[in-house]
Image: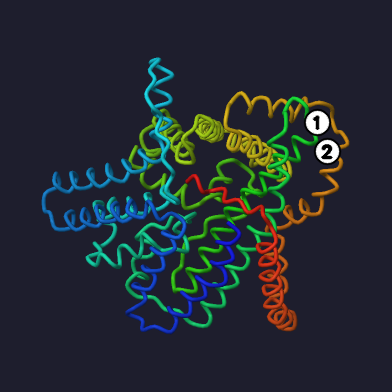
Amino acid sequence: MVFSSITFLYFFLPAVIILYLLSPKKAGNFILLAAGLLFYAWGEPTYLWVMIASSLVDYAAGIYIDRSDKKGKKRLALIISMCVDLGFLFVFKYSGFAVNVFNSVFGTNFDVPDLPLPIGISFYTFQSMSYTIDIYLGKVKVQKNFISYLTYVSLFPQLVAGPIVRYEEVAAEIENRTSNVDSFGEGAGLFIKGLAKKVLLANNIGMLWTQVKAMDYSQISVLTAWLGILAFTFQIYFDFSGYSDMARGLGRIFGFNFPVNFDHPYQSRSISEFWRRWHITLGAWFRSYVYIPLGGNRKGKFRTYRNLAIVWILTGFWHGASFNFIFWGMFYGILIIIERLGFSRVLEKLPPVISRAYTFFMVVTGWVMFDIDTMSDVLRYLKAMFAGNGLADSLALYQLSSYGIIFVLCIFASTDIWSRITGVLSVSVRTRKIYAYTAPVVMLSLLLLSTCYLVDATYNPFLYFRF
């Protein structure tokens, strides 16, 4: 993984950017397509055909839906397209889970498939599905050029870990986009910011969670349990938001405007607000293609709560083929339904510090269910958080002293304090000039620090590989 990261940072990425910027505008999609296929084959050569096959089916379905004048035939083409997309997703991601459940329920002994999960299959499947659904709904114009369509599906900046970019959001830019000095500078800054989040913050704080997660939960102190899950709380945020920022930064370099995927979610005052700020593109996808088609909140309270329950169970299941993810989704579904029943008004009246503390506590509790595989271990860990082996011990104090500084940095970086500071600095002409001169130095320093870490470190996990 270290070699791959360095190779990508120093060879693949600069080569693609230089080639793209020096080539004629008409060659842009060919270069991005070739780069996307090469990038994916680099990480997952065996299953490149899955992405291409699903893209071919969706492209053909879009053409057929556009040309057909009969609603029944349009619907049939859409159903076939969705069945192929979801079929690939089921076979590679959920077939083992399904066989395990079947064996447990019926006492059978069928062999459990152990297929490697194609990288990013959940992301590009949802993207490709959004295209055919929107063609059927008449929201976007059909893409008749397969090269352009496959360029959209295989865009390497966000292919592996999102954000989930719907076709309607980049349809115009697929056909015509502009890369200039301003977009390059903005994109490079955003990429470096995301790289620093992932490498300097997520990786360093994540080492603590890796240690704690491997321990005997009945033997750890309350403080160790809290330090461990708080470490994961920051690790997953900076890991995923870091990848999203890198993707958005690369998108800007190539002339795309990918949607924002995170907006300081740990400052939220309710669970509903948290999910408006966390993985924004996933929430928007489920809202557009599941919640609203089911009726949304237009058909009475019971149907609204039912629809919310369905969406959150599916959201949990999307994250992984395991019961802990389903329970994690149900946990959020219950909390959001409770807020819909009137608790949101209570949270609005509470002092911000209390409502934020409540939300953060619930989110941290949810992360226990998210990253610990079995519910029995989840319950043991939750017990350790409130009734562990003593309030604190020497190990907990050592962990606190060792990771105290990185915790402070993570807390600071997860808030909007820095953006407020830069906003104040931009008011004065003098401070604007100072910031304009110092910002490139800061970005270059972050790039050098991140590179040094990648060269030297052996701990560089990719949390979203299973998606």
Amino acid on which disc 1 is placed: Ser
In the image: residue 187, left or right of residue 266: left
Foreground residue, 4 or 67? 4
Q: Residue at x 66, y 39 (%)?
A: 364
Q: Residue at x 33, y 43 (%)?
A: 88
For marks 2 and 1, give the CA distance.
7 Å
Residue at the limit of the structure toward the right, as seen here: 394
Q: Which mark is residue 221?
A: 1
Q: Residue at x 55, y 67 (%)?
A: 7
Quarter of the rendering containing residue 154: bottom left
Quarter of the rendering containing residue 228: top right
Residue 86 horizontal/vertical position (percent): 33, 42
Against 17, residue 258 (above or below) is above
Against 267, residue 294 (above or below) is above
Which structural element holds mark 1?
loop
Q: Residue at x 37, y 23 (%)?
A: 110
Within-10-Å neighbours for mark 2: few <14, some 14–19, many 20+: many
Within-10-Å neighbours for mark 1: few <14, some 14–19, many 20+: many
Against 186, residue 395 (above or below) is above
Residue 208 horizontal/vertical position (percent): 73, 45
Residue 189 horizontal/vertical position (percent): 60, 72
Amino acid on which disc 2 is placed: Ala
Determine contact: label 2, label 1, CB under 8 Å: yes
Residue at the limit of the structure toward the top, as seen here: 107
Q: Which mark is residue 396?
A: 2
